[in-house]
Image: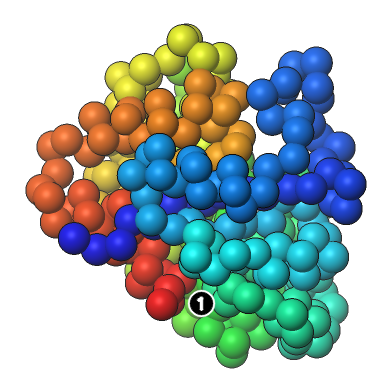
């Protein structure tokens, strides 16, 4: 069995990296700091070995601090850099005191003031630098941005793109036609993969089950195939939906029709390949 890799987790210390998007009144489950000790406990509870740590804010300082995380629990870091700036210099800054390898870059495009940030020329130049450094780029977008994501992936065929949270999350009664068309368009490109993550974060505990997301996951499996899907807990945001263990159990149910080898691929093999983990 391959190493079990949770391909999408976050850590934060609000004293050094304020997470202003966390509303203590509506998000009490995550209105605190989360460190590697918490991560180790979560991985043990969900039967995973290590995790890919993903930036939570568009901050170089945060990425520098995350790169110093414990490598026994963090297999790699998807950091943030300003793609319109000197990418090589920023990556060198992050790497100075790093204990874990930088494996990719992400920008919170879904909340960027520019709704077409992905299509900026300077961003395109930055993506070329990522390809030269052997890194990936994580798309964090919503359904209406999937067309932009596909366009960018076409323009950079040598760069691997990872779609976070399947381009969601979604309400169970949402019209998914735009999303389904976007997913098929993106999945048709060989340099794209997607994460089974973040779907339950927008649902209160007890209001959802594996069946809630069965149509979404079935569509993702049809589009990408099990070989191009990565399991991610989206912890600690998973606590908003009932916890990482609940999501892990739901994923097991949703993948029950796959072979053991295909399940191993989703639960670690694909992440190891996509992010070049060692």
Give the residue number, with chain letter if any, for mark 1: 159
User: SS class of the residue under badge 1?
Assistant: loop
Residue 92 versus residue 221 in the image, above or below: below
**The N terminus, quarter of image:** bottom left
Residue 120 lies left or right of residue 70; in this view the side is right
Against 213, is 122 above or below? below
Identify the residue at image location x=54%, y=19%.
203
| Left or right: 166 in relation to 146 | left
Q: Quadrant of the C terminus?
A: bottom left
- Residue that extends furthest to the top in the rendered view of this protein: 207
Please provide percent x and percent y for residue 85.
84, 78
Percent x, y of residue 11: 67, 49
> Residue reaching furthest left?
259
Q: Quadrant of residue 180?
A: top left
**Rendering coords of residue 52 (x, y %):** 51, 59
- 179 relative position to 97: left or right: left
Q: Is residue 141 visible?
A: yes
**Dot 1 surroundings within 10 Å: few (below 14), some, or many (20 or more)?**
many
Residue 87, image x, y percentages: 76, 82
In terms of depth relative to the viewer, which is nearer, 60 or 193? 60
Q: Residue at x 36, y 35 (%)?
A: 248
Residue 173 visible in the shown view = no
Residue ID at (14%, 56%): 261
What residue is at 25 percent from the left and 58 percent from the top? 265
Tell me: residue 173, above or below residue 258.
above
Q: Nearer the viewer, residue 217 or 28?
A: 28
Give the answer, above or below, for where 94 lies relative to 30: below
Task: Choose between 189 and 208: the one closer to the eye.
Answer: 208
């Amino acid at each position: 069995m391959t190493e079990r890799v949770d391909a999408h987790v976050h850590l934060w210390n609000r004293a050094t990296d304020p997470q202003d998007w966390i509303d203590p009144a509506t998000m009490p489950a995550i209105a605190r700091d989360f460190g590697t000790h918490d991560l180790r406990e979560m991985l043990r509870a969900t039967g995973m070995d290590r995790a890919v740590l993903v930036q939570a804010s568009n901050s170089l300082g945060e990425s520098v601090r995350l790169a110093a995380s414990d490598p026994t629990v963090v297999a790699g870091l998807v950091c943030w850099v300003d793609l319109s700036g000197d990418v090589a210099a920023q990556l060198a800054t992050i790497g100075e005191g790093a204990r874990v390898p930088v494996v990719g870059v992400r920008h919170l495009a879904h909340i960027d003031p520019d709704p077409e940030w992905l299509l900026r020329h300077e961003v395109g130049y930055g993506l070329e630098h990522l390809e030269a450094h052997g890194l990936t780029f994580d798309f964090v977008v919503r359904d209406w941005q999937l067309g932009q994501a596909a366009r960018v992936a076409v323009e950079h065929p040598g760069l691997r793109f990872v779609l976070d949270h399947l381009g969601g999350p979604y309400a169970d009664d949402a019209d998914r036609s735009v999303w389904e068309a976007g997913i098929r368009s993106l999945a048709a490109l060989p340099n794209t993969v997607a994460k089974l993550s973040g779907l339950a974060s927008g649902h209160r505990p007890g209001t959802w089950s594996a069946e809630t997301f069965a149509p979404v996951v079935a569509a993702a499996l049809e589009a990408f195939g099990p070989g191009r899907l990565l399991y991610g807990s989206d912890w600690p945001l998973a606590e908003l939906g009932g916890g990482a263990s609940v999501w892990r159990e739901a994923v097991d149910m949703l993948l029950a029709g796959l072979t053991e080898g295909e399940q191993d691929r989703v639960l670690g093999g694909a992440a190891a390949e996509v992010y070049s983990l060692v």
